[in-house]
Image (cartoon, rainbow, N blue to C red):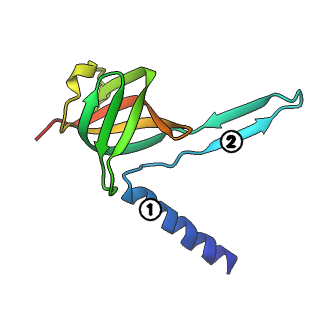
Amino acid sequence: MMKSFLSVAFATALMGALAYGQASTSSTTVATDPSGATKTTTTTTESAGTVTEYTPGQTLILKTEAAEPLHYKFSKTVTYVTADGQVIEASKIRKDSKVRVHYLKDGDDMVVDKVIVTKDRD
């Protein structure tokens, strides 16, 4: 019975994540070593959509399948690449570009560290 419940819960969570354009979910693991030091590990999350607003090096607003557009901030170092992995200039990202973004959750902020152009504007 518990196994069925967990399967349904996992499937529901997965469908919710896909509906919001996320290819993976973020997770944070906090561990304390024997000396008492705390180590935090964060997993990168990815979303895909269409750029609706973009200020290089500062912010990006992405229209996904979610009801509301997603707002991102940029980390100090952001890598911009094409779908086949070629590094490009930030200026190649424009309104209506189809992109995937890798980001980390930092409090309430989603901080981008990589932008992948999947398709140019139509």
Residue sitting at x 40%, y 22%: 78
Query: Which residue is disc 2 drawn over?
Result: 29
Q: Is residue 120 above or below residue 15?
A: above
**Spot occupied by residue 108 in the image (x, y as percentages of width and height):** 52, 41
Residue under the image location 34 percent in, 56 percent down: 66
Packing grade of label 2 (10 A; few <14, some 14-19, many >=20) is: few
- Could you say which quadrant of the image residue 49 lies in? top left
| Residue located at (60% from left, 37% from top) | 42
Secondary structure type for disc 2: strand
Residue sitting nearer the eye, 3 or 50: 50
| Residue type indicated by callout 1 | Gly
On the image, the x and y values in percent for residue 77 come to 44, 19
Q: Position of residue 92 (x, y in %)?
A: 21, 24
Q: Is residue 115 shown left or right of residue 11? A: left
Amino acid type, mark 2: Thr
> Measured along the vertical axis of the image, is residue 57 above or below residue 104?
above
Badge 1 crowding class, 10 Å Cα cut-off, few under 14, some 14 to 19, many 20 or more, is few
- The percent position of residue 62, horizontal first and vertical second, equals 30, 42
Q: Which mark is residue 16?
A: 1
Relative side of 80 to 52, left or right: right
